[in-house]
Amino acid sequence: MSWLNTFSFVMRANVTTLKERFSDPERMLHQLIIDMEQELGRVRESVAGAIADQIQLERRVQKTQDEVDHWSERATSAIGRGDESSAKLALEQKLMSQQRGDTLATELVKQREQTDKLRSAVQELEDKIRQARQKQTLLLARLTRAESSTRINQALNRVQSKSAFAEFSRLEQRVEREEAMSEAYDRLEGRDPVAEDLERQFEESDRKERLEREFEELKSRVQESAQ
């Protein structure tokens, strides 16, 4: 079973189902998170490679644009000198650079889309890992409680205790259950996906505000220089 199938199964499963399906549920849950973290590492490597390719394409696009500007200036200069032959040659070079630039720009758009998809995959996998860890904490707490109750019941059956002792044991089981549930909730309180998602939204909002601010400043400078 792949980690993705295991993850889907665990998200739907309860303690009884896990014990029926896996001989060692605790070990299975631990291995599942390890497998997911390894997959996350591989996806992050892919993202890094995609970003590197994007950077290279951006540099090549800029280089071709510089060439276009260069040949445009040469053509203008030649026309100013009355050298039409050189002007036409310069314009020909400019057009060739523009064609290369257009092709590279198209590739850059595709590369950016691919990079964005990989970034989304990283985010999705990180969310799945958080869910798996939360589920692991809760299921293991319930598993421990179930196993503890089973052992206690077996012991009580063996000794065939009197009703007073049996009542005491049931009270002890209830206390242990409450303690286990309290510990489970304490562990879960350490992670809050809703708060983390809200924090990401604030960060994205701040990023957009900075971008808009820089855009307005740039537009203002360009307008001032044109006056």
Image (cartoon, rainbow, N blue to C red):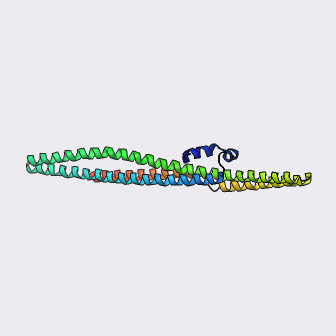
- Left or right: 162 with respect to 73? right
Q: Is residue 222 visible?
A: yes
Kindly identify the residue that appears in the image at 65 percent across and 51 percent down. 25
Kindly identify the residue that appears in the image at 46 percent across and 54 percent down. 44
**Number of marks:** 0
- Left or right: 93 with respect to 53? left
> Which residue is at the front of the view, 135 or 116?
135
- Left or right: 92 with respect to 173? left
> Which residue is at the front of the view, 95 or 122?
122
Kindly identify the residue that appears in the image at 40 percent across and 46 percent down. 114
- Residue 5: percent from the left, percent from the top? 56, 44
Kindly identify the residue that appears in the image at 59 percent across and 49 percent down. 131
Q: Does 102 appear above or below 55?
A: above
- Left or right: 196 with respect to 169? left
- Residue 29: percent from the left, percent from the top? 62, 52
Q: Is residue 197 visible?
A: no
- Residue 134: percent from the left, percent from the top? 63, 51
- Residue 159: percent from the left, percent from the top? 87, 54
> Which residue is at the front of the view, 41 or 196?
41
Q: Quadrant of the N terminus?
A: top right
> Which residue is at the front of the view, 34 or 54?
34
